[in-house]
Image (spheres, rainbow, N blue to C red):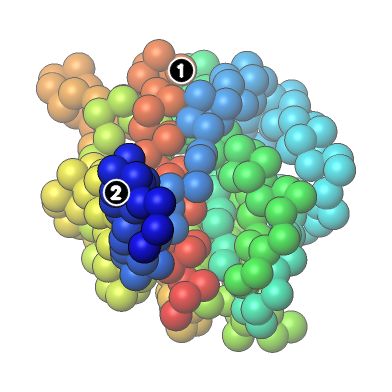
């Protein structure tokens, strides 16, 4: 070769290295979750704004405030209001579920749900449910921010805000889960349940000491998928160290054969003489007990779970 200069050896070596790097990039596994960014700090902000409504028991001014908050957040979306009247131990009550839908290209739906009201029997103790209803509402509002304006090449994603999850007098099969029982029956009648590929109820996910229980009433393969998603994010230590059978807003869907999972951290706060059940259903369930970090962990994991479901 004519006019070869020693410096060209260096240039050739750099070209070879670059070509090798490109070849490796073409064959190396793609980290699909690298681009997924859930803003837990913003979810926490939404939770704080929502919890400022105060106690949200059915029929209270706080409950109206909570409804107006949801209507404001989803004013740009096609927000459906599912209003129904049902009998409770305190008499007939009118309740409101809210549904917002983000369409995808694949035939099927992934549902994320939460309840937004607070416990009716605790209406006189200033129970604001920062973790119990507040954290999950903030999570869903921020999840909507992620979904809004994106082209969803996978399944449609629907967000559901249930009313009437809490017992009006004492927890039982008939005195609890009013909103989810109503919607599951409605969607069963109109054929919607057949379209649902996965249903997630999100509950008490803001706990600063995050420890999501593996619920024995949930669909096992769906929980396995959530754990796989958590591992991809390096967050598996926050999931499924313990197991228990939880009664929650997924039961009416489980009973109808819908793949369902309860994503819940039931071990919330200290368990001592003053707090036999931790902060759960106490006036101490306040904003200082929940964190942006926990909401980020949950958010990143569930975004990756959506990705894994779309690949199935």
Label 1 crowd (10 A; few <14 / some 14-19 / many >=20):
many
**What SS does tag 1 mark?**
helix
Horizontal side, residue 156 vs residue 225: left or right:
right
| Residue 157 visible somewhere in the drawing | yes
Residue topped by disc 1:
287
Horizontal side, residue 106 vs residue 37: left or right:
right
Question: Which circle marks residue 167 in the picture?
Answer: none
Rendered view: 282 above or below 36: above
Residue topped by disc 2:
9
Q: What residue sits 61% from the left and 38% below the top?
A: 142
**What SS does tag 2 mark?**
helix
Image position, residue 19 (x, y; %): 37, 60
Pick whichever, 6 or 17, lies toward us: 6
The image quadrant that residue 68 belongs to is top right
Q: What residue sits 16% from the left and 27% below the top?
A: 271
Q: What residue sits 30% from the left and 75% below the top?
A: 221
């Amino acid at each position: 070769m004519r006019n070869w200069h020693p410096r060209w050896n260096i240039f050739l070596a750099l070209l070879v290295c670059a070509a090798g790097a490109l070849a490796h990039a073409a064959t190396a596994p793609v980290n699909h979750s690298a681009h997924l960014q859930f803003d837990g700090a913003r979810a926490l902000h939404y939770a704080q704004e929502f919890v400022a409504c105060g106690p949200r028991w059915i029929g209270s001014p706080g409950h109206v405030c909570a409804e107006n908050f949801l209507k404001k957040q989803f004013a740009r979306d096609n927000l459906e209001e599912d209003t129904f009247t049902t009998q409770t131990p305190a008499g007939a009550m009118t309740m409101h579920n809210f549904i917002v839908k983000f369409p995808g290209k694949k035939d099927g739906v992934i549902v994320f749900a939460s309840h937004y009201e607070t416990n009716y029997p605790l209406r006189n103790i200033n129970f604001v449910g920062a973790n119990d209803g507040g954290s999950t509402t903030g999570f869903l509002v921020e999840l909507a921010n992620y979904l809004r304006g994106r082209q969803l090449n996978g399944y449609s994603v629907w967000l559901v805000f249930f009313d009437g999850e809490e017992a009006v007098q004492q927890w039982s099969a008939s005195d609890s889960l009013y909103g989810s029982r109503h919607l599951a029956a409605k969607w069963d009648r109109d054929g919607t349940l057949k379209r649902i590929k996965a249903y997630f109820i999100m509950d008490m996910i803001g706990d600063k000491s995050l420890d999501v229980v593996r619920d024995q009433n949930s669909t096992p393969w769906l929980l396995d998928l959530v754990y796989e998603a958590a591992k991809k994010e390096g967050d598996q230590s926050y999931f499924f160290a313990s197991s228990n059978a939880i009664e929650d807003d997924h039961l009416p869907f489980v009973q109808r054969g819908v793949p369902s999972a309860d994503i819940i951290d039931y071990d919330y706060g200290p368990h001592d003489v003053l707090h036999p059940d931790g902060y759960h259903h106490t006036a101490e369930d306040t904003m200082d007990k929940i964190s942006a970090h926990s909401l980020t962990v949950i958010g990143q994991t569930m975004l990756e779970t959506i990705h894994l479901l779309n690949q199935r």
